[in-house]
Amino acid sequence: MLAIVSYPTIQESEQNWSKLNDQEKREVAARKQFLEHWETARLKSPEQLPELDGPKLTLVWDCVEEATRRVTVLRQGDIEIWREPALYEGYERFREIVLILKQKYGARLADVVPTPGSELYLYGDKVSALDHVRGTLQSLKEGRGLGGV
């Protein structure tokens, strides 16, 4: 590693607003808007998910283009069960959501299958992201806890 670049937080940027150029101000505003939307739209608890039929559930993890942003979509077959803003390098979010799915559906949750269209945002540029996702799924299939994955 040659260097670590530390970007200012939204609060730090707002405190130095007069020092920002117009492009930086637009970027800060867009980031703030995304985070506000993220907080209201993200899956937080099993109660937000619908009841699903079937003794074994295999869900699909997809990423689709919606207007000006990408969205993570969870499906059981043709039935959409959840959608939220997609996170780039969202492999940690994948683990969080699988844990919530496990809380909701218990032992009936057999698998969560990422689509090829979800791979860019799921794995991003992080070399170990695929291993994280595989570890989460392996823990799910073996019935182990997901917290330490």
Image (cartoon, helix red, strand yellow):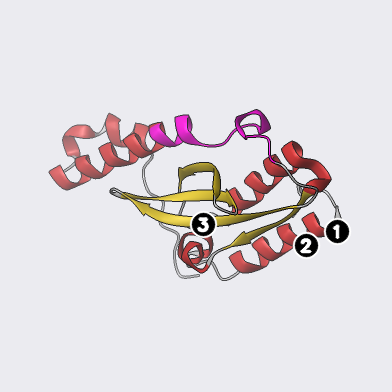
- Mark 2 or mark 3, which is nearer to you? 3
Q: Outermost residue toward the left? A: 22
- Cα separation, mark 2 vs mark 1, equals 6 Å
Q: Secondary structure at mark 3?
A: strand
- Report, in whole angstroms, how far the alpha carbon at label 2 lies from the one at label 3: 19 Å
Q: Nearer the viewer, residue 148 or 98?
A: 98
Marks 1 and 3, the one that precedes in the sequence: 3
Q: Could you say where residue 106 lies in the image, as x and y percent from the top left?
A: 80, 42
Query: Local crowd at mark 3 within 10 Å, few (<14), some, or many (≥20)?
Result: many
Q: Which residue is mark 3?
A: 62
Q: Amino acid at mark 1?
A: Glu
Eyeballing the image, is 20 above or below 45? below
Residue that numbered label 2 is attached to = 138
- Decide which of tag 2 and tag 3 comes sooner along the chain: 3
Residue at horizontal 75%, vertical 41%? 105
Q: Quadrant of residue 43?
A: top right
Give the percent coordinates (x, y) of residue 32.
34, 35
User: Relative to 128, is 67 on the left or the right?
Assistant: left
Give, as a single range, the part of the protein colored magenta.
37-52
Q: Residue at point 63% right, 45% down?
A: 97
Q: Which residue is mark 1?
A: 142
The C terminus: image quadrant: bottom right
Query: Residue 26, located in which quarter of the rendered image?
Result: top left
Residue 22, x across and y down, in percent: 14, 43
* Residue contact at pointers 2 and 1, CB within 8 angstroms: yes
Is the residue marked by circle 1 packed among few (<14), some (14-19), or many (20+) residues within 10 Å? few
Which residue is the extreme one toward the right?
143
Q: Secondary structure at mark 1?
A: helix
Separation of marks 1 and 3 at Cα, in angstroms: 23 Å
